[in-house]
Image: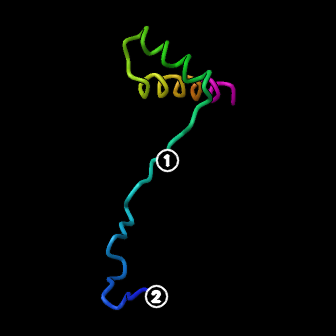
Amino acid sequence: KYDFSKGEQGKFYHPDVVLKLPIYLDDDLVAFIEEYAKEKKADLQTVVNDILRHYKEMLQALKI
């Protein structure tokens, strides 16, 4: 049995919070991206974002 009589409703609620969910990649993709990032002397996040941006641009160009 729990006593919530001293609890404060909404104490930790923040409507403007943006959640960034983790994305899990397959092992072969991680290995490829790690190697590519090492060659480019860049961090993984930058490499993944660059790859996805390029792919996004390619898809948008095909929508014509």
Q: Amino acid at mark 2?
A: Lys
Q: How is the image coloured?
A: rainbow
Question: How much space separates mark 2 and mark 1, taking CA atoms?
Answer: 33 Å
The magenta stretch is: 58-64
Percent position (x, y) of residue 39?
43, 8
Percent position (x, y) of residue 35?
49, 13
Q: Residue furthest front?
A: 1
Element on which disc 2 rests: loop
Residue drawn where x is 54% and y is 39% of the image: 23
Left or right: residue 56 compared with residue 49: right
Residue drawn where x is 52% and y is 27% of the image: 53
| Quadrant into which the C terminus falls | top right
The answer to whether residue 25 is above or below residue 3 is: above
Cβ atoms at labels 2 and 1 below 8 Å apart: no
Residue 60 inside the magenta-drawn segment: yes
Q: Residue furthest right?
A: 63
Q: Earlier in the sequence, mark 2 or mark 1?
A: 2
Percent position (x, y) of residue 19?
44, 53
For label 2, count other residues whose C-alpha is less than 10 Å away and answer few (under 14), some (14-19) or many (20+). Answer: few
| 1, 40: nearer the viewer | 1
**What type of secondary structure mainly makes up the magenta span?**
helix
Residue drawn where x is 49% and y is 47% of the image: 21
Residue drawn where x is 56% and y is 37% of the image: 24
Percent position (x, y) of residue 61?
63, 25
| 59, 38: nearer the viewer | 38
Say which of marks 2 and 1 sits in front. Answer: 2
Q: Amino acid at mark 1?
A: Leu
Residue occupied by mark 2: 1
Residue 14 inside the magenta-drawn segment: no
The answer to whether residue 8 is above or below residue 57 is: below
Name the disc covering residue 21, or none: 1
How many callouts does the rendering have? 2
